[in-house]
Image: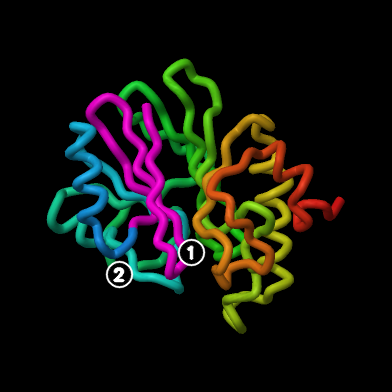
Amino acid sequence: MFVETFYLNCLAQASYLIASESEAIVIDPQRDIQIYLEAAKKRNVTIKYVFETHLHADFVSGHLEFAKLHNAIILMGSKAKTNFNFIGVADGTILQLGKTKIQFLETPGHTPESVCAVLYDENGNTDSVFTGDTLFIGDVGRPDLFGAKIPKKELAAMLYNSLQNKLLTLPDTTKVYPGHGAGSMCGKALSSDKISTIGKEKMTNYALKCK
């Protein structure tokens, strides 16, 4: 099992390639999918899935090109409303990837359809979580971007539940891979670090100290 990070500096946007055995999944891909195809070729793996943690408003994703040209299956939160085909994932949905597995958690708040992905190692231990725009390093996702569609107080309540009752219940050693870093408008205090842990965020993330 391995995880490779791709970072687009101009958008402070992170995407990821996860692989086990000969199978791989890309999380929140950039528009230019060639970088993932080249990485997969070097690792001798096939990208079978593309997972979008939520509907993005700040960049164009390459998920449709993956599906149309490379037969990858698009995965999104089951509550997402789109004009393209995808397989919906919800709380507890498990994806077997080679010798490892990914379990999905519905984490609404930044957007109503947001979903995070928990990666387990080959021994079944919790390894990491890919948090999209729900949990950043040093901050959390903004719940005020939907305007009049959904009241921000309602989304904030969803976000609180997603953080406190789902993500923060993961083991403290769980690595955190967020969807954005410093410079993104999706939060106000994002760190320039690319990786953290649940335990570190509990101790240092101001937005989690609300109990």
Q: Outermost residue, right direction? A: 211
| Magenta span includes 6 | yes
Q: Residue at x 48, y 46 (%)?
A: 90
Q: Outermost residue, left direction? A: 69
Given residues 188 and 125, the one toward you in this image is 188
In the depicted structure, whether residue 122 falls above or below residue 67: above
Label 1: state its secondary structure. Answer: loop
Label 2: state its secondary structure. Answer: loop
Q: Quadrant of the N terminus?
A: top left
Q: Residue at x 59, y 64 (%)?
A: 110
Magenta part of the chain: 1-29
Query: In the drawing, does residue 132 fall left or right of residue 18?
Result: right
Residue identifier under label 2: 83
* Residues at circles 2 and 1 in contact by the CB criterion of under 8 Å: no
Q: Please state the total of marks drawn on the protein image.
A: 2
Q: Residue at x 68, y 58 (%)?
A: 139
Which mark is nearer the camera, 2 or 1? 1
Find residue 182 and report its image quarter.
bottom right
Q: Earlier in the sequence, mark 2 or mark 1?
A: 1
Estimate how packed mark 2 is, as few (under 14), some (14 to 19) or many (20 or more) residues with alpha carbons within 10 Å: few
Q: Which mark is residue 12?
A: 1
In the depicted structure, whether residue 124 falls above or below residue 141: above
Residue 72: x and y in percent read 22, 48
| Magenta span includes 5 | yes
Mark 2–mark 1 Cα distance, whole angstroms, equals: 27 Å
Residue 210: x and y in percent read 84, 55
Give the residue type at disc 2: Asn
